[in-house]
Image (tube, rainbow, N blue to C red):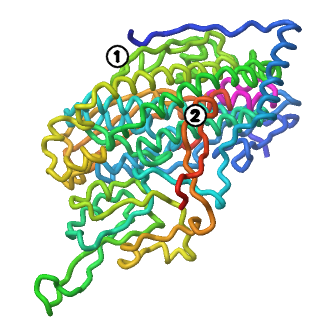
Amino acid sequence: MSISEGTIGELRAKGVEVKRLEREYYEIFIGPQHPGSGHMRIIVRLDGDIIVDADPDIGYVHRTMEKLSEGREWIKVTPLVERMTIIDACNVTLPYINAVEKLMDKRPSTRASYLRVLLCEINRIASHLYGFGIFGVFLGHSTAYMWGFGDREVFLELAEILTGTRLTYTYHIPGGVRRDMPQDFPQMARRAVRYMRNRMAEYEKIFLNNPVIVSRLRDVGVISKTRAAELGIVGPTLRGSGVRYDVRLNEPYEVYSELDFEVPVFEEGDALARTLVRMEEIKQSLNIIEQAVDWLEKHRDEPVIAKEDYEKLPKLHKELYEKTGRVKLLPTQISMKVPPGKAVARAEAGRGEIFYYVESDGGVMPYRVRVVTPSARNVIVFKKVVPGHRLMDLPAIYGSIDYFPPEADR
Amino acid sequence: MPPRVAVKNLKKGGGLFEGVKSNIEALIVGIKYFVDPKRMTLLYPKEYPEHRPGYRGFIVLKKDVCISCAACARVCPSAAMKMVRVTEADPREPGKARQKQYPVINYQRCIFCGYCVDVCPVEALYHLPFHDITYESLADMFLTLEAFQKEPLRPVEKEGSPVVYEFDESAGLVKREKKGGA
């Protein structure tokens, strides 16, 4: 049975994409159970070794987070949404809390802002090293995998000392954070920073300048500046193409405008440039950690939640805070009501800009929480950039955009 | 100085000399770690990590302190904590019985966010600094009121030795035997 030309014309007129099935093309399904695919499937059609069409089939880990958020109280949404990017949990929950703070007209104390930035940068490094490790093993460079995951442990250990857990921090609450930094944290953070700085030189030698790796990445998956803006991609993938956009720079949140750091941008737009943007970002994040720790050490008198909230705390809670640095929640915060309104907030997560739209109808639960995640915007690279490359370039491009399926699927 | 953009450029693809040089550099780094590896691998269960006091691990109830306010059950984001009603002897009026509610926890659902510990107005709940306990059946993970008051035994403490991680400038994390033993 075949469809007549007339029917095809009608369908095309309606805006339906109609493709003729080419018999000589070879169709392979990479994923969802393929070790290198992540929680997704890429349907690749090959002409010999050349990819003619790549179709990312996403949605395998869709958990209806936006809908679930509407059924739980405001502070209970944080442990939910951090599960969409468990390796970058601090960065993805921060804009949600920022949006709620905008609705409540509450400002965190400066100390809380610095602590947030500190954890965000620790998390960014851990997230980049995770992506780097996966990227290494995609290219068959298992040393990079071991190094990336091993050095990530250093920063997870720092985060654990700060928050009490390795990954799902649930660190932010409206108006502040849940814990103060321990007394000996600054020395440990400085040691970790100095270690990682020396380590970066070795990363360059064994991986980034390694001719085997360079030849697999240079001029692969090139996205020009205009093309990048057109596709609407974000994060290191965008900055690898020479677009100067970083939320920390263009729309500073928390205390980023007071910190001294660079936003690395590469003009080339290939897989190597995108990888190097991440590596340079790690160096800058190390600088930010040092500055944040220095500031926090000097300004110890301020509480880690908004001043007016701290004064309302009962005596037992204040004593505990002085002794352990833990901020107790008040039972009233469980069913806290947020004034009706709409708020948006964005932040620069490890993979790019994450955007929240939060609407309240004055109740104890959000009326609507909309999330646009960086991976959801970067997935288009598979469709638009991959065709034309050889099959062996697919892992290189996949790894270089650091795509994380659970984040895209939400 | 405020944040700023730094435009960088890739190194140009070098010639034969550059290629040979970077190959040798990569090999030297590889050999260096082959001869002098810096390992942080934990030989669990011969060694087990000793976490700091702030670690958010298993939760234990101090029943005598609990005031039955149910804030912990209300704040639980995954509905792991529930209140149970028990009839017990009234300490204030001897010979009489009273009804009181206490929280119990279901570790099938718990995500260790620590909200319950933070919200308790009288500090009747506290964290243990470890996570590694196994249960024989799923039903065992639903703790009874008695089990919730006991600090669970950590099986690895019997066969292993405690280890702490320290930050080091040359090796990142260094594993050290904890002084004083278990």
Label 1 crowd bin: few (<14), some (14–19), many (20+), radius 10 Å = few
Q: Quadrant of residue A30?
A: top right
Question: Is residue A115 or residue A135 the one in the foreground?
Answer: A115
Q: Chain of mark 2?
A: B
Question: Quick one: SS at disc 1?
Answer: helix
Q: Amino acid at mark 1?
A: Glu
- The answer to whether residue A19 of the structure is visible from this angle is no
Q: Does A17 lie within the magenta span?
A: no
Checking the image for residue B168, the label placed there is: 2
Identify the residue shown where x is 47% and y is 44%: A160
Left or right? Give the position of A160 relative to B35: left
Checking the image for residue A177, the label placed there is: none
Question: Quick one: SS at disc 2?
Answer: strand
Q: CA distance from mark 2 to mark 1?
A: 29 Å
Q: What residue would you read off at disc 1?
A: A258
Q: Position of residue B176 (x, y in %)?
A: 59, 47
Q: Which residues are magenta?
A: A381-398
Identify the residue shown where x is 41% and y is 52%: B53
Q: Position of residue A404 (x, y in %)?
A: 59, 38
Question: Is residue A287 or residue A129 the one in the foreground?
Answer: A287
Q: Quadrant of residue A312?
A: top left
Question: Closer to the camera: disc 2 or disc 1?
Answer: 2
Q: Chain of mark 1?
A: A
Name above or below for residue A29 compared with residue A378.
below
Q: Are marks 2 and 1 on the same chain?
A: no
Q: Position of residue B117 (x, y in %)?
A: 32, 58
Question: Is residue A139 or residue A398 the one in the foreground?
Answer: A139
